[in-house]
Amino acid sequence: MDSLQPQHTNRQYEEELRAVRADLLKMGGLVEHQIAEAMVALVNRDEPKARETIARDTEVNRMDVEIDERCVQLLALHQPAASDLRFITTGLKITTDLERIGDNAVNICERALELNEEPQLKPYLDLPRMAEVAQSMLKDSLDAFVRDDAALAEEVIERDDEVDQLNYQMYRELLSYMAEDPKTIGRATRLLFISKYLERIADHATNIAEMVVFMVKGRTIRHMDKKKHE
């Protein structure tokens, strides 16, 4: 009977690791949904959807706490080493980035509610494109995490430049609106905030991708110059 105990412990440990992976994916899927719903609320000037999305942030926060507690428990009870240790510590960091992405989706909804109080300043074309790229970066960074795919993670990191460029284009366009007509400053400023929130979402997706590279290769590339990385 005693000889079977280590096998049972190992099996239970593996199940706990799989549960952490599944919970992270579930949280990631919820956060992706939050981004999509926030953009629908903005583009369609949909106040109920904006408020629903804001209210759903409590679920993101709950998952953040639960996954963190599960990871800490794994560290305390099993004292994992090598790849398992990198997996768990990466999971702890990913939840932080996912929670902050959820916060940015809430921020978009709050600005959308404020924008609904005035006529729409301009057609929303660049912002949905930014959101689309940022969402795809988040999805691929999580796929890379699940598949231990450092190559896909590095592709995500490269795509951050596209979001930065779109953010800069929005900045220049909205600056011209404000310069031509001071009455547009309030609306233009809120749109600038939304553009910045989307740029931050892409940054958090990049953080996740960088942590995946660390998890797979044991090599830290965060805060490194891109030329050095290459």
Image (cartoon, helix red, strand yellow):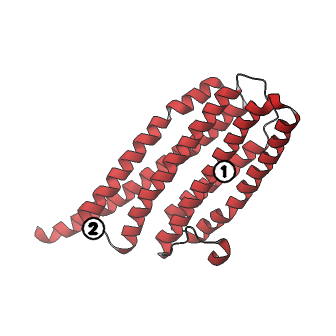
Image quadrant containing the C terminus? bottom right
Observer able to see residue 139: no
Quarter assignment of residue 74: bottom left
Residue at point 72%, 55% (across, down): 164
Does 73 sit above or below residue 131? below
Under mark 2, the amino acid is Gln
Residue 199's tag is 1
Q: Residue furthest left?
A: 1
Whichever of callouts 2 and 1 sits on the residue coming sooner in the sequence is 2
The spot of residue 210 in percent (x, y) is 55, 65
Q: Residue furthest top?
A: 117
Q: Is 166 situated left or right of 136 in this image?
A: right
Quarter assignment of residue 195: top right
Residue at point 39%, 55% (across, down): 20
Residue 79's tag is 2
Circle 2 crowding by C-alpha within 10 Å: few under 14, some 14–19, many from 20: few
Foreground residue among 58 and 216: 58
Residue 94's tag is none
The spot of residue 18 in percent (x, y) is 38, 58
Foreground residue among 137 and 117: 117
Residue at point 59%, 60% (across, down): 206
Under mark 1, the amino acid is Glu
* Helix, strand or loop at mark 1: helix
Q: Residue furthest right?
A: 180
Q: In whole angstroms, how far apart are the C-alphas of marks 2 and 1?
A: 37 Å
Observer able to see residue 138: yes
